[in-house]
Image: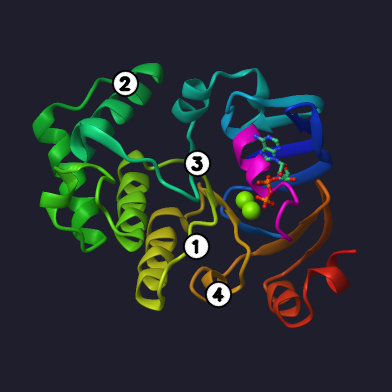
Amino acid sequence: MLQITNLHATVADKPILKGLTLSLNAGEIHAIMGPNGAGKSTLGYVLSGRPGYEVTEGSVTFNGEDLLGMEPHERAAAGLFLGFQYPVEIPGVSNVQFLREALNAQRKQRGEDPLSGAEFLKVARAQADAMGMDMDMLKRPVNVGFSGGEKKRNEMVQMGIIDPALAILDETDSGLDIDALRVVGDGINRIMRKPDKAVLLITHYQRLLDYVKPDFVHVLADGRITRTGGAELALELEEHGYAEIAA
Ligand code: ADP
Ligand code: MG
Ligand code: MG
């Protein structure tokens, strides 16, 4: 599904990714772990096409297509979803408006008919119910006044509505208490643990991986993958630290 080959990228002319190679098949959940400043978020931003992140070498294909040649909205329409470490607040725009527009823009790009308000609300209600979120919250402005846990729950509802093929979740566990962590873990499993979907889970800590068991764990250090293993590698990292394992 996703093939990253020898990816080099700079931010403000500073080389951050330095020859990163990684491939993900449908049906797989991959965790990327690594020390602060290693380039984990940069990888997520490069894959989503965020301005300011310049690819200087290498290639990325998504379902055989050149991902780097696609505009950010084309990447989303092709099935890529990026969950941020710090979800944005959008005053004046309700979750329902925002998500219906996002979903319909993607459907249009794919040549599908837009969902009517009623059809969309049905989808939204099912996802809100599945995440134990009150519909009133979905009618409020995007993330405004939401607690950290509520933002993450909201992100899972967003992901459920968008129903992406590939989710890249960057430190989606940061700042969560154990209950919220379970909610997010259950959401990822319910929405994304499917034969035709894949997840790239970027995390600094092992604890989310107690809820979402990865098929592969990669260590990202100094802009490249320095080690790959199974779920047990995360436990090893937790015990021994990155300095010993990643070097
Ligand atoms: P991680 O997510 O692994 O902690 P990041 O990808 O956020 O790492 O950052 C990697 C490196 O890129 C860090 O040294 C960081 O300071 C630098 N960096 C990230 N964004 C910018 C930016 N906008 N301008 C300059 N340097 C940046
Ligand atoms: Mg960081
Ligand atoms: Mg980061």
Residue named by callout 4: 207
Q: Label 2 is placed on what type of residue?
A: Glu
Residue named by callout 2: 112
Query: Percent from the top left, x then y, of residue 121?
Result: 13, 40
- Relative side of 197 to 121, left or right: right
Mark 1 within 8 Å of ligand 3, using the beta carbon:
no
Q: Residues within 10 Å of mark 3 (few under 14, many from 20)?
A: some
Q: Earlier in the sequence, mark 2 or mark 3?
A: 3
Residue named by callout 1: 174
Q: Residue at x 16, y 43 (%)?
A: 140
Q: Earlier in the sequence, mark 2 or mark 4?
A: 2
Q: Residues within 10 Å of mark 1 (few under 14, many from 20)?
A: some
Q: Earlier in the sequence, mark 3 or mark 4?
A: 3
Q: In the displayed image of the protein, which residue is found farthest to the bottom?
A: 239
* Whole-number angstrom distance, CA of label 2 to CA of label 4: 39 Å
Residue 82 - label: 3
Q: In this rendering, does residue 62 appear at all?
A: yes
Q: Label 1 is placed on what type of residue?
A: Ser
* Magenta-drawn segment: 34-46
